[in-house]
Image: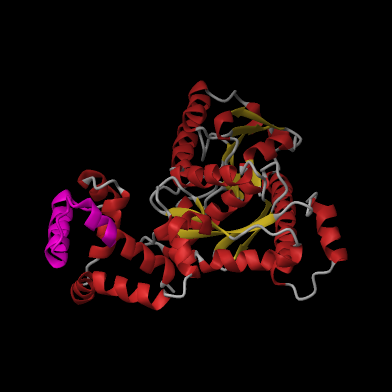
Amino acid sequence: MVKCSDIAKMNLDGMWLLAGKAGLDRVVSWTYVVLTRPFDDHMNHGNFAFCGVDFERFGWNEVEKIMLELNDLKISGFAVSIKDEKEPVPERILNLAEELALPLFQIRWEKASFVDLAQSIGNYIVEENNKANRKGDFLYNLLFGYDINERYIEKIAGLFGMDFSIPHRVGIIVVDRVYGDNLENDEHTYNYYMSCMTKMISDMEDATLFMNFLNKGVILFPDYEDDRIIKKLEYILNQLDEDIQFRGRIKSTCILGRPYLNPQDYGKSYQEAKSLIFKKDALVSSQKKKVISSSMMGIYKFLFANGNREEIGAYCEKKLRKLEEYDSANSTDLIDTFLAYYMNGFNVSKTASALYIHRNTLQYRLAKISELLELELDDYRECLEIINCIMVKKMMFSQ
């Protein structure tokens, strides 16, 4: 994947950066020549736009409007070429680029073949995408290939500078999406999100393999004792969550399998991560916790090793039956409400905010829980008993 900073480093003949350096990390998905409105009919997230200032169709007032409109459409960068070099770019245009953190380039008029420039950038994007795809192909073969021999493994290590003498583990990045009225726009946003994720992961210094697979991200990385890659993944996924383009629309969680030394066992790590997907909501104890694994199950994981699975299940079923029956009959979610109440420190305001409901609605639900279970909400021992039953069911019996 390509960023505006990569385009700046291409040193294209007659094209240079004017302003908006703060936005150079914007990912470029493709190129777009500004011609006619409506732009949102043609524009996709991450497009790099070219605009010829001819003072007839496009003067500086129009350019200013275009920059604002295209920035709202999540443009990655903007380039202007001024007919016959009639005048310099006005200060207000430069200031706007700085304000929007929108990389603004200028193209010398005599060199201004937008088609050639767009083709050069497009070829570069295709080349970078092909590199990412090759990594994805290698990872797919490592995880699912039928004949992963030592020679093939050496080839991968040599191509991508990977050290398979260190244990590696697989992470599955599960992407949760909120759909709006425009499904086509939602899909563009998702594709751009995954492009940004791919670029950010590929920029990590440590050797990793990454691919998009079945609407999820899959990453293979060395398992260092200092967990530095896990910390970088936490940082990347939190950055994406907080990006104004994706906030409230898309968020991700990375689920890890166990580390293995033998590359032929990496598929096991993938399957282990896959088995935890349906348990991720129970494992995540913080909105900022973006990387989870079976080790986060704490004391609950020991229940899996015991032979009294059915007995434990029956006990939890009995404790939660009234809540489950009420939820089923009334299409409510009292169980998840009570879990959220616990996750937010039994704080009504925080819980209501986390659930996006009014605090009066939450108070009503808590009162109903108290009534059904004959439970005093200030009896923390009894509350913890219910929470444990909820957690055990989510971890042991969710499919």
The quarter of the picture where residue 8 lies is top right
Q: Indicate left or right for 393 with 85 as reference.
A: left
Q: Indicate left or right for 26 with 251 as reference.
A: right
Q: Residue furthest top?
A: 91
Q: Residue furthest front?
A: 307
Q: Nearer the viewer, residue 59 or 238?
A: 238
The structure residue drawn at horizontal position 30% and vertical position 59%, both measured from the top left corner, is: 387
Q: Quadrant of the C terminus?
A: bottom left
Q: Which residues are magenta?
A: 357-386
Q: How far across and down, in percent of the image, does residue 319 sit?
A: 25, 70
The structure residue drawn at horizontal position 30% and vertical position 47%, both measured from the top left corner, is: 344
237 to 188, vertically: above or below: above
Residue 149 part of the magenta segment = no
139 to 251, vertically: above or below: below
The structure residue drawn at horizontal position 46% and vertical position 58%, both measured from the top left corner, is: 297
Q: Nearer the viewer, residue 88 or 260?
A: 260
Q: How far across and down, in percent of the image, does residue 302 sit?
A: 47, 63
Predominant SS along the magenta part:
helix
Q: How far across and down, in percent of the image, does residue 22 sit?
A: 55, 30
Q: Nearer the viewer, residue 397 or 73?
A: 397
Residue 301 visible in the current orientation? yes
Q: How far across and down, in percent of the image, does residue 197 sit?
A: 58, 50
